[in-house]
Image (spheres, helix red, strand yellow):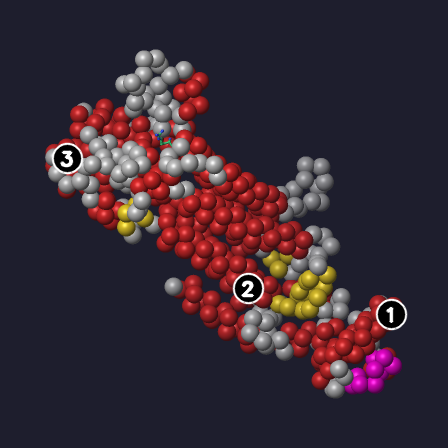
């Protein structure tokens, strides 16, 4: 048991209490941030005349050595320390002696942990944003290859109107555009430096907080020391943004699972990204998509956990806040892993264009277009809707699609039908005539793709 405190205690901490209280087993993940923050703090203390140059040099050298030794494996973080801050400070003092004991001047673990967590979250925001961008590149490639891959668009999971695979993928591209912009918002809002807030009320040392903030790449120091040490909004915001990302991935997974089913057969998941059954030899299961869908619950759980942890806390720091880490780390790992797995699965997936097109040709996805055909010949839309409804009913009875009906059969339902109806309700026409902004018609899709390209170059 190695603690940074103890002077005012007359007894050793109970072993179980010590273990219950300690966070080293999980906050060791923050060692880089802790060392980087400590180096900045020492450099600032020297600039302000609080540390001598020799002391600062010894501290910076010692901390850098700890970092490189942790990275090359010659030093390991042992669980005998209470938390990562205690480990770094004690190890430093063990290495350089008394100068190490001065590092904590004008600082508290409360502003230190707030800083570490902020730097960690900030870095992860950038990583997750980068992964989303990689995924968008894959989606854009699929879109460009499938501008003329016709497929049914669904509402209520019933075939509705024909779209293209490019258009369908574009919907997910848009979701990830919003996800990325949410992450950027969070980054901008959170990028203020809590270092120098002290335990809660600042400090009497003449710290240059703006200087430490700039050394660590923050926009500015935080403006209220009590808020600085008790703010975990940025954790909640990231958990919320990741929950939305996972919700999007989960919907995407659901579609892939449906598309991969024997009944649909729209896609073929690459062998490297699917799994078999221990008993049924014919099986090829979409386990990755199912796991992504399933893991969404963990990320939502972390968000709910953090919101609940924070809801009753009076200002300023309370130990409850140590609970911000495990759930957040797990949610970050989960989101990143799911993004990587899912995008690789999509990148290697085969789309069965013929099956998609056949499916779009069946199921009356062109019924709206057939109604529009009548409207263009003067029939009021509501009447046209009724006529096509009767036509569909007759088609179902005869087991035919609209374009398989003879002109006589069509005319027996409405005299307005003419030979050009077949061209009007062909899949190609149905899609290519949809040229309103955001529609699947090739001309407008090409414009959107050009915009996406520009967006990805930024
Ligand atoms: N391990 C603590 C945490 O993660 C560090 C801050 C401890 N501060 C304190 N006064 N006990 O929140």
The CA distance from mark 2 to mark 3 is 57 Å
Q: Quadrant of the N terminus?
A: top left
In the rendered structure, which segment of residues is drawn in magenta?
410-419
> Residue at left 72%, top 74%?
368
Q: Nearer the viewer, residue 188 or 277?
A: 188
**Image coords of residue 399 (percent x, y):** 84, 67
Q: Is residue 97 visible?
A: yes
Q: Which residue is mark 3?
A: 51
Mark 2 or 1, closer to the camera: 2
Say which residue appears at 72% left-offset and 69% top-offset: 365
Q: Main secondary structure of the magenta part?
A: loop
Q: Is residue 158 left or right of 40 when viewed as pictured?
A: right
Task: Quickly name the residue at label 1.
Answer: 398
Residue depicted at 45% across the width and 55% down the height: 182
Verify whether residue 415 appears in magenta: yes
Residue 120, by quadrant, is top left
* Residue 63 visible to an observer of this rendering: no
Mark toward the start of the polypeptide (2 vs 1): 2
């Amino acid at each position: 048991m190695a603690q940074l405190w103890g002077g005012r205690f007359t007894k050793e901490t109970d072993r179980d209490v010590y273990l219950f209280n300690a966070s080293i087993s999980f906050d060791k993940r923050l060692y880089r941030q802790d060392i980087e923050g400590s180096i900045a703090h020492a450099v600032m203390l020297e600039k302000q005349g609080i540390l001598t140059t020799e002391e600062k040099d010894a501290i910076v050298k010692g901390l850098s050595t700890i970092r490189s030794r942790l990275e090359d494996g010659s030093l390991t973080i042992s669980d005998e320390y209470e938390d990562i801050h205690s480990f770094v400070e004690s190890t430093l003092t063990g290495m350089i002696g008394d100068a190490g004991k001065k590092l904590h001047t004008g600082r508290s673990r409360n502003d230190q942990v707030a800083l570490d967590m902020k730097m960690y979250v900030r870095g992860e925001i950038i990583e997750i944003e980068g992964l989303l961008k990689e995924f968008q590149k894959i989606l854009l490639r699929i879109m460009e290859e499938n501008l003329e891959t016709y497929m049914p668009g669904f509402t209520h999971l019933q075939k509705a109107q024909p779209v293209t695979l490019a258009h369908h993928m574009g919907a997910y591209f848009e979701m990830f555009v919003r996800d990325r912009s949410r992450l950027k918002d969070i980054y901008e809002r959170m990028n203020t430096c809590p270092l120098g807030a002290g335990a809660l009320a600042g400090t009497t040392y003449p710290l240059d907080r703006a200087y430490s903030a700039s050394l660590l790449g923050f926009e500015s120091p935080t403006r209220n020391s009590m808020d600085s040490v008790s703010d975990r909004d940025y954790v909640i915001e990231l958990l919320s943004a990741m929950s939305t990302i996972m919700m999007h991935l989960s919907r995407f997974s659901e579609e892939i699972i449906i598309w991969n089913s024997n009944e649909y057969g729209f896609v073929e998941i690459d062998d490297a990204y699917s799994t078999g059954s221990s008993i049924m030899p014919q099986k090829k299961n979409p386990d990755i998509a199912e796991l992504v869908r399933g893991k969404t619950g963990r990320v939502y759980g972390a968000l709910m956990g953090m919101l609940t942890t924070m809801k009753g806390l009076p200002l300023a720091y309370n130990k409850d806040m140590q609970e911000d880490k495990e759930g957040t780390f797990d949610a970050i790992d989960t989101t990143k892993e799911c993004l990587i797995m899912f995008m690789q699965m999509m990148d290697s997936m085969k789309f069965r264009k013929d099956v998609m097109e056949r499916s779009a040709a069946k199921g009356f996805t062109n019924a709206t277009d057939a109604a529009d055909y009548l409207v263009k010949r003067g029939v009021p839309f509501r009447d046209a809707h009724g006529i096509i409804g009767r036509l569909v009913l007759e088609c179902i009875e005869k087991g035919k699609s609209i374009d398989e009906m003879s002109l006589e059969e069509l005319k027996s339902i409405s005299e307005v039908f003419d030979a050009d109806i077949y061209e009007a309700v062909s899949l190609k026409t149905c899609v290519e005539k949809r040229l309103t902004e955001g529609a699947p018609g090739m001309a407008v899709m090409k414009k959107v793709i050009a915009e996406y390209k520009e967006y990805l170059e930024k």
